[in-house]
Amino acid sequence: MGSNLLTPLAGIVITPGLHLQRKLGPLTINVDIVWATLIAGAVVITLGLILRSKATSGVPGKFQLAWEMAVGAVQTQVDDSIGPRGAAVVPLALTLFVFIFTCNLFEALGIGSPIDFLPAPTSDINLPLAMALYVIVMVHRAAIKNRGVKGYFAHYFAQPFPKKLFFVNAFMNGIEELVKPVTLTLRLFGNLFAGGLMLALLAALVDWKFGSYGVIGGVLSSVFTVVWKLFDMAIGAIQAFIFALLTILYFDSAMAPDQPH
């Protein structure tokens, strides 16, 4: 009986990670990810231009009020973590949050097909990796500006253990710096990729289980898809927040004065 139940499932084919691709010399470009990223960037820029046109020093409208609340939340987080010297981090953290959240919202437009017309760019590892590397480069730049070149390199040998264990300090700090962009990338990519995979799996399972029920099966399929997409949108917001929060924390570590041990 168990074999009979699994036989229909064997016919379900899910092919995650497929993209519309074009060759550019030795490079393979995921065209759908490129245009989805450009559209997300255009959305963020448009929102900024709309805000600029509607900004007022008087009673703010709903749109301006929403932006001010977002800026205030990020400003509070930066002040609590870094202090006044971290004011320059606010625009970067806020922009990352809005851009990543916009990209993640594209997940809700997917229908579980192998190739979506407008996929979530963050579900492809290239974009999260590019953003993570940019953040890490800016973090190291801030650390050099804060400690100076000599202090920047000395920091890796002097902490967290006494200076006589400098080789242990260098090894541990080196591993930590290498892991930062990797974890920042995989956390965002993994969650969004899993969301798309679950949507494809849900579509296949609903079709397998309810496909023979006609209209009723279609209604049930729509209900399950809507529920999952709402959950997926919440996950997208959380992941955008975590990426921005980790950016702030990394800058906090880079801009903090060295403490004696």
Image (cartoon, rainbow, N blue to C red):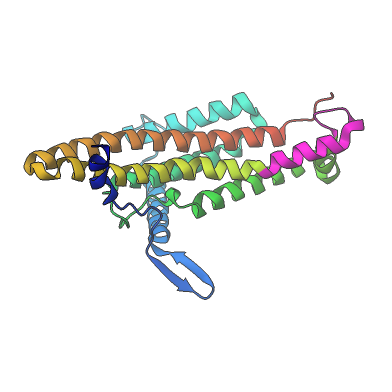
Residue 17: image quadrant is bottom left
Across and down, in percent, residue 195 comes to 37, 42
Image-based side of 101 in relation to 111, left or right? right
Can I make out residue 146 in this image? Answer: no
Q: Does the magenta portion include 164?
A: yes
Q: Does the magenta portion include 196?
A: no
Can I make out residue 19 in this image? Answer: yes
Q: Residue at (38%, 49%) from the top-left corner?
A: 120
Image-based side of 32 in relation to 6, left or right? right
Across and down, in percent, residue 25 comes to 52, 76
Across and down, in percent, residue 153 comes to 82, 43
Question: What segment is highlighted magenta in the picture?
Answer: 158-178
The extreme right residue here reads 164
Q: Residue at (53%, 44%) from the top-left corner?
A: 186
The extreme left residue here reads 215
Q: Nearer the viewer, residue 235 or 45?
A: 235
The extreme front residue here reads 1
State the quadrant of the C terminus. top right
Q: Residue at (40%, 64%) from the top-left corner?
A: 31
Residue 167: image quadrant is top right
Image-based side of 74 in relation to 170, left or right? left
Q: Nearer the viewer, residue 86 or 257?
A: 257
Q: Nearer the viewer, residue 220 or 80?
A: 220
Q: How many marks?
A: 0
In the displayed structure, would residue 1 be above or below residue 37? above
State the quadrant of the N terminus. top left
Most prominent secondary structure in the magenta stretch? Answer: helix
